[in-house]
Image (tube, helix red, strand yellow):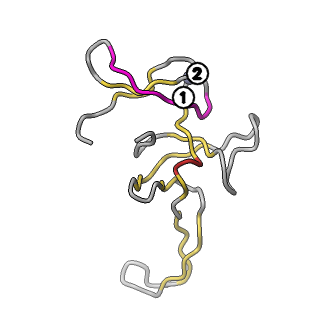
C-alpha cells in the first residue's frame, strides 16, 4: 500500500487538487480503504450530510463529513521536496523496509510489519 493512515499527501487530481506549485493542497490521510482503493483525507471532498437529531447531535441538521477519494488522486508528500512524490520501497541498512522518495532518495518512513 502506497498510502498509509496519518500520511501527509498532496491532492493531485479532483476538485480539491493542487493548483500548481504556488497552491499545493496537502492534507492528512484519516483512513485508508484498501478494498475500495480509496482514502479519506482531512478536509478534502467534504460533503454536507443531513442528519436527524440524535443524542450526540441534538440539533440535527447538516454535518460536514469527508467523502472518500480515489487513492490515485493523492501522492505522499516528501518533506524534503515539499510536494507529492512517487515513492518506492527498499530494505534499509538495519534490515527494516522503508519507503523512500524516488525524486530525492530521502527515506519517508519505515514500514511496520503488522500490515
Ligand atoms: Zn524527496
Indicate the quadrant where residue 96 lies. top left
Task: Judge: label 1 CB < 8 Å from ligand 1.
Answer: yes
The answer to whether marks 1 and 2 mark residues whose Cβ atoms lie closer than 8 Å is yes
**Left or right of 45 in this view: 4:** left
Q: Quadrant of the N terminus?
A: top left
Query: Helix or strand or loop: what does disc 1 sit on?
Result: strand
Residue drawn at (73%, 40%), measured in percent from left and top?
A: 23
Badge number at residue 103: 2
Indicate the quadrant where residue 77 lies. top right
Where residue 44 sits: x, y (%)?
Answer: 59, 56
Residue drawn at (44%, 21%), measured in percent from left and top?
A: 107
Q: Is residue 75 above or below residue 92?
A: below
Residue drawn at (27%, 42%), measured in percent from left and top?
A: 115
Badge number at residue 78: 1
Task: Judge: label 2 CB < 8 Å from ligand 1.
Answer: yes
Q: Which residues are magenta?
A: 82-92
Where residue 42 sits: x, y (%)?
Answer: 52, 53
**Left or right of 100 in this view: 110:** left
In this view, the residue farthest toward the bottom is 52
**Left or right of 74 in this view: 22:** right
Amino acid at each position: 500500500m502506497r498510502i498509509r493512515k496519518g500520511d501527509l499527501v498532496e491532492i493531485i487530481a479532483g476538485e480539491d487538487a493542487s493548483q500548481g506549485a504556488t497552491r499545493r493542497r496537502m492534507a492528512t490521510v484519516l483512513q485508508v480503504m484498501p478494498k475500495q482503493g480509496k482514502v479519506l483525507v482531512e478536509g478534502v471532498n467534504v460533503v454536507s450530510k443531513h442528519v436527524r437529531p440524535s443524542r450526540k447531535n441534538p440539533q440535527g441538521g447538516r454535518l460536514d463529513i469527508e467523502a472518500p477519494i480515489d487513492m490515485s488522486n493523492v501522492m505522499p508528500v516528501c518533506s524534503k521536496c515539499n510536494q507529492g512524490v512517487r515513492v518506492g520501497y527498499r530494505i534499509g541498512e538495519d534490515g527494516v523496509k522503508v519507503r523512500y522518495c524516488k525524486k530525492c532518495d530521502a527515506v519517508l518512513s519505515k514500514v511496520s510489519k503488522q500490515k
